[in-house]
Image (cartoon, grey):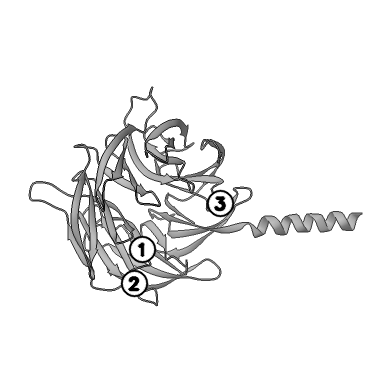
Amino acid sequence: MKFIYFISLLFCSFLIKAQNIPLYVGTYTSDDVQGIYYYNFNTLTGEITNKKLAVKTENPSFITFSKNKKYLYAVNENGENSFVKSYEVNNDGTLAFINKVGTNGNGPCHVQTNEANNKLVVSNYGGGTVSIYTIHKSGSISESPQVFDHNLENKQAHAHSAKFYKNNLFVADLGRDFLAQYILNDKEFVLKENHLMKEGAGPRHFEISKNGAFIYVINELNSTVTVLQQKGKNTYKTIESISTLSDDYNGKNQCADIHLSADEKFLYGSNRGENTIVVFKRDAKSGTLQKIQNISVNGDWPRNFTLSPNGKFLLVANQRSENISVYNVDNKLGTLTFLYSLNAPTPVCLLF
């Protein structure tokens, strides 16, 4: 009987460990914070364990994987001395440096890859520029990017995020209040249109539905989500703008991140100031949104958040309070329930 009990415990322990997947955390560095950190995340329990330094590097404020997850790319947000770096992912979760290139603008705050065209794009908030690089088979980044400069003589651009969708590249520019749309023409991207937000909205991050029919832009400065719907080939029109804040909240706020659930039934956004995650129910046909929840992040300044690959958990990186908050996701209702919070060194980007 004791033997059976022991075997059962051993099996349960093995099962729990088998559910562990890597979680990488980008940071703003200091004397106590050294770079990109690696954790184990348990997809069965939501537990975060075994923190270790994956690589020492300065201010890796946004990180992303290659599609096969063999390589990781990070921007180093260091003013005019800023880089995007490529790393190989080792078996133990640590990162091996491959190469680095300048970002052609200060304050890089976002990076994304497009495996279909072997491209990587960096958004430079301070410089107002967008740099597009070629990724080599070795995981290294090319030295000669295509660069877009959004600045005008009388208006400072602040490129805040960029995403590829098929042959399109979209860029949220907080400084100039638009979502730029570029189209791949032969080997280079060319501007098709700037989709305007409300003046002073401050578009920051965005999500594109899987079929490309809708784009959801979270606006940092006026705390709204703007919904764009595709009208004809490669053309979009604004159909809705909805507040991210609770009806009774009147304080200052700056929105940050936004994500669709895997089934695209729900949309989530982060509020810095109100310090909440807002939850919207999404109408799949019309693309419009209904606000159903604002829940505390149990911390301060939720810069970035992510959903676990199985969709069961949502994790929030609270920059100022230096903690990661973990929530259960109700897959039917979309609502969140707080599980626990873990102290973490200045978390600003979470990556599964």
Question: Which residue sits furthest top?
Answer: 248
Q: Are marks 1 and 2 in contact (CB under 8 Å)?
A: yes
Task: Check disc 2 and report the residue beneath it.
Answer: 135
Left/right placement of residue 290 relative to residue 218 reads right
The disc, 1 or 2, on the residue closer to the chain's N-terminal end is 1
Q: Are marks 3 and 2 in contact (CB under 8 Å)?
A: no
Nearest the eye: 45 or 105:
45
Image location (x, y in percent) of residue 122: 29, 60
Q: Amino acid at mark 1?
A: Thr
The disc, 3 or 1, on the residue closer to the chain's N-terminal end is 1
Task: Check disc 1 and report the residue beneath it.
Answer: 113
Left/right placement of residue 263 relative to residue 241 reads right
Dot 2 alpha-carbon crowd within 10 angstroms: few under 14, some 14 to 19, many 20 or more: many
Question: Which residue sits furthest right?
Answer: 1
Task: Check disc 3 and report the residue beneath it.
Answer: 310
Image location (x, y in percent) of residue 36: 44, 60
Q: Amino acid at mark 2?
A: Ile
Q: CA distance from mark 3 to mark 2?
A: 29 Å
Q: CA distance from mark 1 to mark 2?
A: 9 Å
Q: State the residue at coordinates (61%, 57%).
A: 20
Nearer the camera: disc 3 or disc 2? 3
